[in-house]
Amino acid sequence: MIPEKIKKALIKNWGDKAEAMDCYCEIKFIEPNSGWACYVYAMDPNDEDSIKCISHFREPKIMDWSLIEVMGCYNDHGEIVIIDSEYRRMRVDELYKKLRGF
């Protein structure tokens, strides 16, 4: 699951910071074979299953999503998503622009 330090940062981002994209994407989930990624930047302190993220396959999408659903994603070979251990956190607004090609 998500390390406690990252979870605390995600919870702290919930609310106005997340709505304004004025925070950092703290963790990245990937499906290595397809190129799909999910950059999580906020977690509801009252429901740790509710997250805000950028889902990216061909184009980035800002989403309200379920952490359980993210963790339950898998590819055609039955492999689950993993945490990208090489990911270095980025500001949400900058990452979104980068993923859109700006």
Image: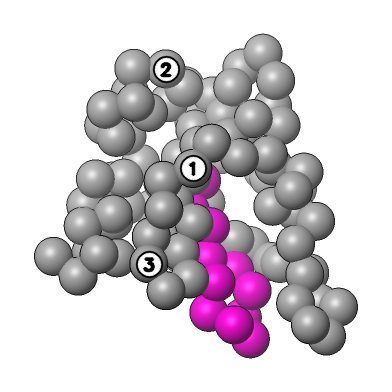
For the question of whether residue 22 can be seen, the reply is yes
Mark toward the viewer: 3 or 2:
3
> Which residue is situated farthest in the top direction here?
46
Mark 1–mark 3 CB contact (< 8 Å): no
How packed is label 2: few (under 14 Cα within 10 Å), some, or many (20 or more)? some
Residue 15 circle label = 2
Numbered range of the magenta stretch: 30-40
Q: Is residue 32 magenta?
A: yes
Q: Is mark 1 on a helix, strand or loop?
A: strand
Mark 2–mark 1 CB contact (< 8 Å): no
Mark toward the viewer: 2 or 1:
1
> What's the amino acid at mark 2?
Gly
Q: Looking at the rendering, which quadrant does residue 16 occupy?
A: top left
Task: Identify the residue shown where x is 49% and y is 56%.
Answer: 55
Residue 63 circle label = 1
Q: Which of marks 2 and 1 is nearer the N terminus?
A: 2
Please name the residue that numbered disc 3 is placed on.
59
Report x, y in % for residue 96: 28, 54
Q: Is residue 5 magenta?
A: no
Task: Identify the residue shown where x is 53% and y is 66%.
Answer: 37
Task: Identify the residue shown where x is 80% and y is 56%.
Answer: 72
Report x, y in % for residue 9: 49, 31
For the question of whether residue 8 can be seen, the reply is no
Q: In this view, does 60 lie above or below 79?
A: above
